[in-house]
Amino acid sequence: MNNRQILNLSAIAIAAILVLFAIKLIPNIGTGYQPEKYISPNDVKGTAVLHNGLAYTLNFEQQNTLLTYLNQSLTIGSEAYKTTKPIPFTKIILYRFASTPIEITPIAVDSNDLIYSAPLWNPNGHMRDISDGSLLKLLNSTFDQ
């Protein structure tokens, strides 16, 4: 290889690196605000479910299972839901180590899936649990009915 070919290959490699760097930065430049989508179990120091004005604390296993279900939830629109099943709790609070608590408010139960509001994860809509009733079963087991 002569020097001209090496120079051309180096220029192409540097240009490719710059293009990849620009592609990585573009989604963060336009919005300014990136909502958190997932929460790590290491970021949560405690979780409580509010039922009849009382806070019921989840144990470590329940908390990790809850976080798994919440991280699997889907973002949906903010359409109105009519619930057919009563929701026995009024709020779920995730207390974090380094940040403000996350408050989750149940909206409705749609075919065993919990529809809830979590403004940190979906500021313009709701979230839908896809555990087919497992999340509701877990939350209902955390307090005396």
Image: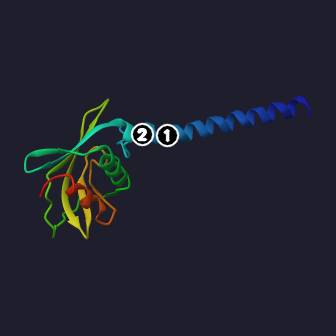
What kind of element bears circle 1? helix
Is residue 116 among the parts visible in the rendering? yes
- Residues 48 and 107: in front is 48
What kind of element bears circle 2? helix
Residue found farthest to the right: 1
**Residue 2 placed where, x, y %?**
91, 31
* Crowding at mark 1 (Cα within 10 Å: few <14, some 14-19, many 20+): few
- Residues 5 and 139: in front is 139
Q: Residue at x 38, y 37 (%)?
A: 42
Task: In the rendered structure, find residue 30 and report the number of the disc placed on it.
Answer: 2
Q: Residue at x 34, y 51 (%)?
A: 65
**Residue 106 placed where, x, y %?**
19, 55
Asked if marks 1 and 2 touch (Cβ < 8 Å), the reply is yes
**Residue 144 placed where, x, y %?**
13, 54
Q: Is residue 76 above or below residue 102?
A: below
User: Label 2 is placed on what type of residue?
Assistant: Gly
Residue 69 in the figure: left or right of residue 15: left
Quadrant location of the N terminus in the rendered image: top right
User: Label 1 is placed on what type of residue?
Assistant: Ile
Q: Residue at x 28, y 58 (%)?
A: 135
Residue at the spot of label 1: 26
Count of numbered marks: 2
Q: Residue at x 31, y 31 (%)?
A: 97
